[in-house]
Amino acid sequence: MLKSALQNRSNTWNPFLAGFAFLTLLVTIKLLYAGGFTTTIGAGMVFPDWPLSNGSLNPPGWTTDEAMLAEHGHRLLGALVGFLTLMLAVWVHLREERAWVRRLAWAALAFVIFQGLLGGFRVLLVSLDLAKIHGITAQLFLCTLVALVAGLSRWWRGIPQKLSAAVAREWSRLRWIGLALCGLIFVQLIVGAVVRHRGAGLAISSFPHSTPEGHWLPQAWPWPVQIHFAHRVIALFITLAFLGWLWSVFRTTAVPRVLKGFAVAALLLLGVQIALGAEIIWSVRAPFQTTLHMLNGAIFFAVVWLTTFGTFRPLLEPVAEKTGEKESSAEAGAVRPLSALAHARSSS
């Protein structure tokens, strides 16, 4: 039965599989918000045990206590995302012909299992460092899932598979610029995780200046101020690098409209991210704005990665160079018998 299922693998677009992958992505985004909110209100250790919560799957009072609701809800959503990712990996393995898509699905499953274990050991070992790693690797899982959803989507098939040598060089340059920008954003996510988990979000209590008196540089440099200020400086570099990348997306030859649309969406997300960062300071770290800043940053990272990942299609799914030659040979083979017949008639 399994062998029969594997023989039915196809490269055609499957709307049901694509829809299920997108559903998994949406639930994952909800999970990221739940995890971020748990960190924001300091509820990560409200239950001292794992995988159960106070020794139960349904701990008493968890629906009426904000901290317990946040953490236990986060755990339940994590289990749901793990189950959905397992189903997705199996479905992709059975139905998807492209090997890179199957590998991506299993990588997503490995990531979500790793995430669950990190979260569990963070509780059992009472480790703030594991909490930071747990938050950072969540971003990598999101990007893995985004790439998988892209490969299964209908719009993916509209990205060119074969480019001329000159255009291929342009795409290669754009690809490297995009990867460099993703790397810079990932560094910012690491710094942001340190700021969040070390309580440095209000180390500088004014914005855009660094002091209430209007100075651009802090007047004192304790460690929380240093990491907070670094977060702001990196944000400035990301903004400048992003504008250069956006310009490259629109000037590179043959970039499809869908990828340009993603790039514009990333621009809007960047504007929202800056506004939310300011609002954290002005609202004195209100939970909703603080958590949304984390979530929006993760989505911004994922959309920039998605746009960059789209430029990999010519490498992942190249068109065979000899296809045209085979067609020409077939056409020639069909003509030869007619020519031979004509020659035979003229000879007779």
Image (tube, grey):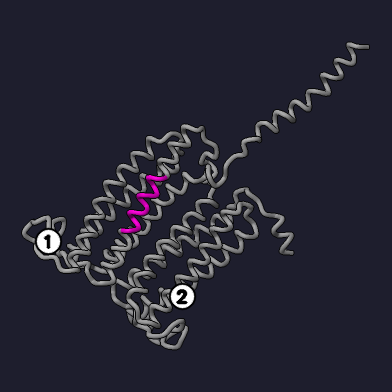
Q: Which residues are magenta?
A: 176-187
Q: Residue at x 29, y 76 (%)?
A: 42
| Residue at left offset 83%, top offset 21% | 338
Inter-mark Cα distance, 1 to 2: 39 Å
Looking at marks 1 and 2 on the same chain, the residue that comes earlier in the sequence is marked by: 2
Q: Position of residue 157 (x, y in %)?
A: 55, 44
Q: Which mark is residue 218?
A: 1
Give the amino acid type for the residue marked by disc 2 in the picture.
Answer: Leu
Does residue 90 appear in the picture of this structure? yes
Q: Is residue 267 above or below residue 74?
A: above
Magenta part, dominant SS: helix
Residue 6, quarter of the rendered image: bottom right
At label 1, the amino acid type is Pro
Label 1 neighbour load within 10 Å: few <14, some 14-19, many 20+: some
Residue 61 included in the magenta stretch of the image: no
Secondary element at image label 1: loop
x and y, in percent, of residue 138 in the image: 41, 65
Percent position (x, y) of residue 27?
Answer: 46, 64
Q: Which residue is mark 2?
A: 117
Q: Residues within 10 Å of mark 2 (few under 14, many from 20)?
A: some
Q: Residue furthest left?
A: 213
Circle 2 sits in a helix, a strand or a loop, which is it?
A: helix
Identify whether 192 is placed above or below 129. Answer: above
The one of 29 and 90 positioned closer to us in this rendering: 90
Residue visible at 53% across and 44% down in the picture: 315
